[in-house]
Image (cartoon, helix red, strand yellow):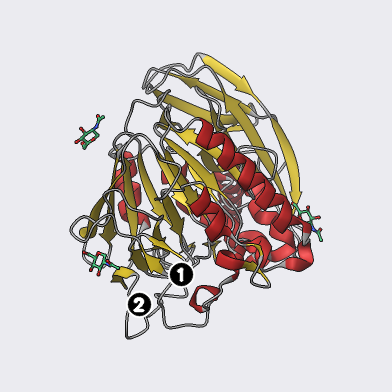
Amino acid sequence: MRSLPCRLESCCCLLLLFSSGVQGAPGAPSAAPEQVHLSYPGEPGSMTVTWTTWVPARSEVQFGLQLSGPLPLRAQGTFSTFVDGGVLRRKLYMHRVTLRGLLPGAEYVYRCGSAQGWSRRFRFRALKNGVHWSPRLAVFGDLGADNPKALPRLRRETQQGMYDAVLHVGDFAYDMDQDNARVGDRFMRLIEPVAASLPYMTCPGNHEERYNFSNYKARFSMPGDNEGLWYSWDLGPAHIISFSTEVYFFLHYGRHLVERQFRWLESDLQKANKNRVARPWIITMGHRPMYCSNADLDDCKRHESKVRKGLRGKLYGLEDLFYKYGVDLQLWAHEHSYERLWPIYNYQVFNGSLELPYTNPRGPVHIITGSAGCEELLTPFAVFPRPWSAVRVKEYGYTRLHILNGSHMHIQQVSDDQDGKIVDDFWVVRPLLGRRMYL
Ligand SMILES: *[C@@H]1O[C@H](CO)[C@@H](O)[C@H](O)[C@H]1NC(C)=O
Ligand SMILES: *[C@@H]1O[C@H](CO)[C@@H](O)[C@H](O)[C@H]1NC(C)=O
Ligand SMILES: *[C@@H]1O[C@H](CO)[C@@H](O)[C@H](O)[C@H]1NC(C)=O
């Protein structure tokens, strides 16, 4: 008598473990997909689905336009085996499938997996094509698996269809490699309600450094062939460039990376400028800022920060490069706060005019948005702001970027501490022509 409930119980447990497959727990390797997320591979009409399983399995996505019923379309992909660098050498199977020929702006339903196990159904909207539409982005950095303050609101707004894409400006999970990469697993599950419905575009931050950024490279699927360290893509009237500031700091992984990335940035900026009449905005995202006015000893506090002036104050600095090619907006994170700068070049403020500083700005605009929430809490500011600092907010939150058309961009900062209140709101306006040069 006594043994029966007991046996039933363990039987149930096993069944639960096998059918949910959520944990990747020892003894229950599962082919059920988890950590599902999207990215845009850069080719119009396409979307890449990435997920993880604990045993090798086929990689298929079934999708369709009907909200319920069968999913008539199929796409196949492949998986790669990721071995984490921790002592357990945990193995993750990373599946990647790219959907092509999607109808611009259409809403799709999909599930991913194989006959050995399917994900639940998710929804996403295919990106529109061409330059004549108005993309909306959620932008933030420094989001952890613990204290992820911005996530509930981002999740709601994603389900309400408020965004076309997410830019996560480095620093994930704190850290993805921790606890034999289990923190990475937990983080990827946490962002799934956002990232399985919107292209979740990334750049590496300092918290991704372990084992030569291997968790970052393995878990995300960014465009191009540089493992997501640097790449660019087009979104409506904007060209968006993502790069690694970390190549300037972790030189033991290869000094050559600084030069390779710099050369790539220059040629990408040249190409973008040839196309500037059609696609006027150039936006960059990189983790560590060139300038900041926080109360810490970070690189951005140094007069000659590495990102701004390069190695030894002269090699491969990015401020001159971005100024030369007329970059409009530079998005940063790393500081756990929000800061907006007046248009700036070489410590000089280049307002369009005193009344309308961001209308025809004569230098790039910088935004630091690293307060999405993590275990390290917020970063305080130095008592006295610098003359180039326009707005500083030490609250959890994230940034909304609405690219209305080729001449108008609307930027808002959302505060999670103040229940979604907009705590900064401004427009960047540049004429359609003559964009390259700051005069
Ligand atoms: C680190 O990764 C980069 C690119 O992913 C590679 O070029 C470099 O050689 C690696 N460095 C080491 C020390 O493995
Ligand atoms: C730039 O514009 C802002 C807002 O009008 C103003 O406070 C600031 O002093 C201006 N800076 C310069 C250098 O003109
Ligand atoms: C761009 O958008 C702004 C703000 O909505 C609008 O005032 C302006 O007329 C638009 N420009 C063009 C060329 O559509």
Name the one closer to the observer, 241 or 226.
Answer: 241
Compared to residue 107, the image places residue 257 above or below, namely below
Asked if disc 2 and disc 1 are in contact, CB closer than 8 Å, the reply is yes
Residue furthest bottom in the image: 383
Q: Secondary structure at mark 2?
A: loop
- x and y, in percent, of residue 338 in the image: 35, 66
Q: Which residue is mark 2?
A: 386
Q: Residue 411 vs residue 247: left or right?
A: left
- x and y, in percent, of residue 353 in the image: 24, 57
- x and y, in percent, of residue 278 in the image: 42, 27
Q: Earlier in the sequence, mark 2 or mark 1?
A: 1
- Asked whether residue 88 is in view, the answer is no
- Asked whether residue 138 is in view, the answer is yes
Circle 1 residues within 10 Å: few <14, some 14–19, many ≥20: many
Q: Residue at x 47, y 73 (%)?
A: 375
- Ligand 2 is within 8 Å of the C-beta of the residue at disc 1: no
- x and y, in percent, of residue 243 in the image: 59, 52
Q: Residue at x 49, y 78 (%)?
A: 301
Name the one closer to the observer, 265 or 15.
Answer: 265
Q: Amino acid under label 2?
A: Arg
Compared to residue 114, the image places residue 322 above or below, namely below
Q: Dividing the image into four quarters, tell me where ligand 2 lies.
A: bottom left
Q: CA distance from mark 2 to mark 1?
A: 10 Å
Q: Secondary structure at mark 1?
A: loop
Q: Which residue is mark 1?
A: 291
Q: Residue 106 vs residue 182: left or right?
A: left
Q: Amino acid under label 1?
A: Tyr
Q: Residue at x 47, y 63 (%)?
A: 142
Name the one closer to the observer, 364 or 70.
Answer: 364
Q: Which mark is residue 82?
A: none
